[in-house]
Image (cartoon, grey):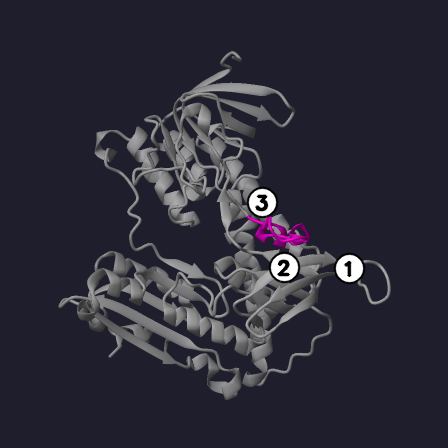
Amino acid sequence: MAPISKECDFLVIGGGSGGLACARRASGQWGAKTIAVESNRLGGTCVNVGCVPKKVTWNAAAIAETLHESAAYGFHIKETAPFDFTTFKRKRDAYVKRLNGIYEKNLLNDKVEYLHGRAHLLSKTEAEVVLDDGTKETIRAKKILLATGGHPNIPSNIPGAELGITSDGFFDLEKLPQRVALVGAGYIAVEMAGMFHHLGSETHLFIRHGTFLRNFDPMIQETITREYERQGIHIHRHSSQSKIEKQKSGQGAREGWMTLHYKDDQSEGSLDIDCLLWAIGRDPEVSDLGLEKAGVKQNSRGQILADEYQNTNISNIFSLGDVCGKVELTPVAIAAGRRLANRLFGGPQHKDSKLDYDNIPSVVFAHPEVGSIGLSEPEARERYGDRDVKVYKTSFTAMYYAMMEPEEKGPTSYKLVCVGEEEKVVGLHILGQGSSEMLQGFGVAVKMGARKRDFDACVAIHPTSAEELVTLK
């Protein structure tokens, strides 16, 4: 075995949002000697190929949407050139690069030693890191955190599937596709379909069932699916893909194009496309982590098994974030990481510190936005029974659309799911403009155990869409 070259109190493997939050708290606030290892760019999925560049792209799509709708308000905007995707991508990449530098500077400020390389466990207390230049460091740590995240999948049983990209590849596109096919029904597929469409690509979304966002309340599923169709996105329901073929040079072939062969509930056919994006799920990043050498247990999907305190089955090894698969959201990993650092290094007053995984708000940056916290209506009825569940809901046209023709107006739909005589709010689901910002405040109320009468007691702010949530009948 290689000699020990470094020793520390805390080794963090994975430089994504959760790992960095935990490392900085452990070192910067509690003084633990901490080493953080990352093999890619600092910030993980969120900063580099997730939340951050996604939201910037969503902003661009929202601006395009607003420009289109501005005519209803009397603006006459003449387009002198198409959307400059190349310039947009260059500026977006530069923004992300600045964030990478900020993350590294923050590690330095909090006295976290940072190694750029690939780490794998050698035992319960040791890990080897292969650095960029091929040299190796062997680290002995009293405690180890595994926060390596995950990666998107490409199907292995469809010929030609490798011709497609994943959400990672979305951010590498140098030009906007003319015609794009997305396969998937989760938030990644839905967000990217909306962005492609509003930036000008002909967009086809292939889903296995009749609606998408199937983990959300049925009101959300049905409303957003209808709205995407109204906007002109092609929804292929109950679909499957049989093969993808690269177009060969010759008459009628276009360079960089491919043909997708599929079935849906309407027909069996093929579609010529210049971009195929798979958004069919993610796997944990554990392939060369050496879990077996330390005896760390995994579930059938390969995710690391960790309890509510982020403990694995090995007493000094912990895990959080997407590699565990509890709730795969960046703020969840950050919150779990900080609480774990408090518990491990913050003294007796933090011995029970952990993240409460109930009532976590989440948003889908679709067009329009979707927000949700707590139980869906079916989940509440299954848990509490029909007699104890009361639902308040409304659908209306937001004032923003007052100047538009009926066929141009987008939907707004809200729902409160309440339980018991006290009518405690156990679920809140909103769809419409501004839902992402709105949900953060209402999320606090739900987390505090608000009842329907607490909502009613709050005076409405008029004219807003949010006032509908405090005036529901």
Q: Which residue was labeled with disc 1?
A: 247
- Mark 3 Cα-neighbour bin, 10 Å: few <14, some 14–19, many ≥20: few
Depth check, front residue: 78 or 215: 215
Q: Which residue was labeled with disc 2?
A: 242
- The region drawn magenta spans 153-170
Q: Quadrant of residue 308?
A: top left
Q: Could you say where residue 139 lies in the image, as x and y percent from the top left?
A: 48, 20
Q: Could you say where residue 7 lies in the image, as x and y percent from the top left?
A: 44, 18
Q: Is residue 169 magenta?
A: yes
Which secondary structure class fits the magenta region best?
Answer: loop
Residue at the outermost bottom position: 405
Q: Which residue was labeled with disc 3?
A: 98
Q: Could you say where residue 456 lies in the image, as x and y percent from the top left?
A: 21, 73
Task: Identify the residue at horizontal 30%, vertical 37% (top origin).
Answer: 309
Q: Quadrant of residue 82?
A: bottom right
Alpha carbon separation for disc pair 2 and 1? 16 Å
Asked if residue 188 is positioned above or below residue 296 in the image, the reply reads below
